[in-house]
Amino acid sequence: MAFWQLRFTVVAAFLAASFAFSAALAADTKRVLLLHSFGRDFKPWSEYARSIRTELDRQSPWKLEFLEHSLSSALSDDENPEGPFVEYLRTLFVKRPPDLIVSFGAPAAAFVQRRRQQLFATTPMVFTAVEQRRIQHSSLTDNDAVVAVAHDFPAIIENILRVLPDTKTVAVVIGESPNEKFWLGEMHRGFAPFADRISFIWYNDRPFVEILKHAGALPPHTAIYWHGMSLDAAGVVHEGETALSRLYATANAPIFTFDGSFFGREIVGGPMHSVLNLSRQTAAAAVRILGGEKAGELKIPASKFATPIFDWRQLQRWGISESRLPAGSEIMFRSPTVWEQYRAYILAVIAAILIQSALIFWLFYEQRRRQRAEILARNTMSELTQVNRMATVGQLSASIAHEVRQPLAGILANAQASLRWLEKANVEEVREGLKGIVSDGHRAGDIITNLRAMFKSDVQEKTRVDINKVVLSVLALARIDLHKHEIELQTQLDDRIPEILANQVQLQQVILNLVMNAIESMSSSQTRVLRIKTALSQTNTVHVSIEDTGMGIKESDLARLFQPMFTTKERGMGMGLSICHSIIETHGGRISASPRANGGSIFQFELPTVASKIKQPELV
Ligand code: ADP
């Protein structure tokens, strides 16, 4: 085969395939003519048309082609303009008639019924969004299906009286188009049973501007019934949604209606037709017809008012309690509660408050725990202090026993000598002997007084104390020990020192601890000197130092010396210095230790005098 022949065959095959595909596509697409009663923007039909189109698209298994036309002649009583419109439609669909016609509203339904033979005699048809009274049932053909609604005028007034029982007047808004005139008559009949309770104002014969003015000054206990406004008494056509919006803006009474297509801003609510329900019914019927079912055989009962719905904003505006609404009513457009709106914030704040409360609670708990621990520690410290004191004094027991024995021996010797002198009637000698007895008695008494003080339980009371006397009382107890260990005692006590406010027993304990440690540290020293100095510093504080020539302190131990349990002794407890530290601190003073230049160590502490305490503010 020549190349051009081959090319021709391929192109021809491709064209044939394309034609076959388009034909199949055309056969698969259904043409639906949507016939509107008025323009495409007249409520309620415009809402139904939009919703039915959406539903049809959703339910149809075929691709749908919508062709929309409006019967503009419906606004007048004159049938003549219909002629050219019929011609126009015939010409439009002469080649391929629609697969289905859907008419919206009574005027479109009436038009098709009138012109059925001239137009599409055999094309199936669905009459929808039309009240059942507006269909001429006698002239319905086998190709006609009806999806109608049934208005219930008494139900509308009953609803108004139910939610606003004080209503005395109902102003009825309706226009002057032929369709509206029909409904005016029906309404008069439907509202008649309420004539004894309610007076009706009929707005049909007023221009819309006048209606607006009147509706703005209605007497109290009036409700407005909105049936629609296609054409007013002045011949003005009201397309779109502006008429109801304008009425709402000026009216001083709540507005009710019969159809859900008007609901959404201005209308209070009640039982109404549901756009969605009817659209679903219509689309279902249309799909069945497009699928081959005979339109005339579909018997669909007229839809009644759906479950009442109410606009929450209007209920608020007119003070209508929800308890007045019929059972099962649905409330729409409810403003979210503060909780719904700010749930996240509220939860965050609550969480923050809870966390904060928990923290505060925890802090309180911790503070209480600390306080309790402090009390416990104080008590323990106090017990420890006493134990330490007794242990230290215990160390001195042999010396003390000796110390007491000495004056007793003196007393005994003096008493015996005095007895001998008495026999010789040597009065002067006897007097001396008795004086010695008294002095020894005092000495023994002093030792016992000091000892008793040291064994007293730890009281916190502070008295005026002479620090030099405290030093001497301690040395009196330690005297024998010093002697036993062959320690040379050097004292340098400043007699200018004023009395200080302190706990005498505790100060004795501090000095005794330091002296005993010094004695212990010198046990294996060649030179054994204990030097105790007291002095009044320039800043008016009492300064006490205890210096020994013992083994000294290692540099590394200096920082830990005053810590509890620090000891370098085999049988030491490591509590003495830490107790000294705590006693001096509670007296507002300071204690420190340092190695001595030529071996040994120096422990020193400072205590504030009463004068230094008073002077303190001046120094600051
Ligand atoms: P303890 O005497 O039971 O060990 P202390 O708290 O009184 O407890 O003393 C702690 C430590 O401080 C002692 O073990 C010792 O190492 C050291 N220390 C105390 N006083 C002196 C001193 N005068 N010379 C050298 N070291 C000392």
Image: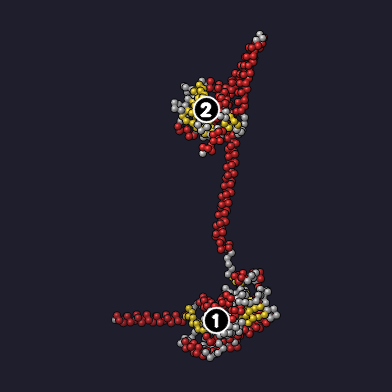
Residue at 58 percent across and 37 percent down: it is: 378
Q: Which residue occupies 67% across, 82% down?
A: 192
The residue tagged 1 is 238
Q: Residue at x 54, y 83 (%)?
A: 237
Considering the image in quadrants, where does the N terminus appear?
bottom left
* Pointer 2 or 1: first along the chain: 1
* Residue 320 image position (x, y, % from top left): 64, 70
Res. 331 visible in picture:
no
Number of numbered labels in the structure image: 2
**Is 559 placed left or right of 134 in the picture?**
left
Mark 1 residue type: His
* Badge 1: residue crowd in 10 Å (few <14, some 14–19, many ≥20): some
| Residue topped by disc 2 | 534
Whether residue 181 is visible to the viewer of this picture, yes or no, is yes
* Numbered disc 2: secondary structure: strand
Residue 603: give x, y in percent of width and height: 50, 29
Q: Residue furthest top?
A: 424
Q: How many angstroms separate mark 2 from mark 1 (CA)?
A: 115 Å
Which residue reaches farthest right?
Answer: 196
> In terms of depth relative to the viewer, which is nearer, 528 or 86?
528
Viewer-side label of 2, 1: 2
- SS at mark 1? loop
Along the line of sight, which residue is nearer the eye, 182 or 495? 495
Closer to the camera, 20 or 604?
A: 604
**Number of other residues with Cα within 10 Å of mark 2, as a class: few under 14, some 14 to 19, many 20 or more:** many
- Looking at this view, name the residue that lies furthest to the front: 618
Q: How is the image coloured?
A: secondary structure
Q: Are marks 2 and 1 in contact (CB under 8 Å)?
A: no
Q: Mark 2 belongs to which amino acid? A: Thr
Q: Is residue 447 above or below residue 109?
A: above
Of residue 593 and residue 156, the one placed in the foreground of this image is 593
Please determine whether, in this image, residue 347 is positioned above or below residue 88: above
